[in-house]
Amino acid sequence: MKKRAIAALFMIVSLVAPIAYGADQAADVIDMQALRAAVKADKKAFVASKLDLTPAEAKKFWPIYDAYQRAIDASNRKRALVVESVVAKDEDLTNAYAKSLATEAIANDEAEIRARRALQNRLMKALPPIKAARYLQIESKIRALQDYDIAATIPLVR
């Protein structure tokens, strides 16, 4: 329960922090369309430009980043299978099949949360907390864009 409260607090701070910094920090606010373009072009270069890592920090960060990206790629492949299952069905889903798809979707979400928790734990040990939090926020924005793009293409089950 305490971990959930801490995670919720962290998410709230992540969302409110840009507002709290005020107008003089407007350059740090990431335009979501620009983010989409930057990630599509070269996500790793975009992350590097936003973190401004020292060589010592980079040596610790990039293996953590790569491991997380592998975990998220696996999660994305599983999610794609669920999406394809829904989109490919030309007929109404049965209750049993709909229940199975919902269970798979939730299991996938839970796997992502575990991967993010492991990422946060490793980052907080490897980087200064501000840079770790910045990366977690960047990754959260990227995931939000990806989630939106997926949601926009999936029809409601019928």
Image (cartoon, grey):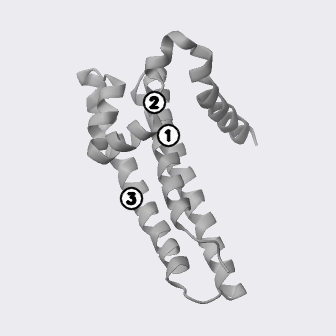
Q: CA distance from mark 1 to mark 2?
A: 9 Å
Between the residue at mark 3 and the residue at mark 2, the CA separation in whole angstroms equals 23 Å
Total numbered badges shown on the rendered structure = 3
Q: Which part of the image, by quadrant, shows the C terminus?
A: bottom right
Q: CA distance from mark 3 to mark 1?
A: 16 Å
Where does label 2 land, which residue?
Answer: 30
Q: Nearer the viewer, residue 118 or 148?
A: 148
Tell me the SS state at disc 3: helix
Above or below for 155 versus 8: below
Mark 3 is surrounded, within 10 Å at the Cα level, by few (under 14), some (14 to 19) or many (20 or more) other residues, namely few
Looking at the picture, how far across and down is residue 98, in whole percent?
66, 80
Whole-percent x and y of residue 34?
Answer: 39, 37
At label 3, which amino acid type do we have? Asp
> In front: mark 3 or mark 2?
2
**Residue at (65%, 38%) from the top-left corner?**
7
Q: Position of residue 64 (x, y in %)?
A: 36, 41
User: Residue 136: x, y in percent?
Assistant: 48, 35
Question: Residue at (45%, 69%) from the top-left corner?
Answer: 80
- The answer to the question of whether label 3 and label 1 lie on touching residues, with beta carbons closer than 8 A, is no
- Is residue 115 or residue 150 the one in the foreground? 150
According to the image, label 1 marks what residue? 141
When the figure is inspected, residue 69 is found, relative to residue 10, above or below; the finding is: below
Describe residue 81's horizontal placement relative to residue 14 as left or right.
left
| Label 2 Cα neighbours within 10 Å, binned few <14 / some 14-19 / many ≥20 | few
User: Quarter of the image containing the N terminus?
Assistant: top right
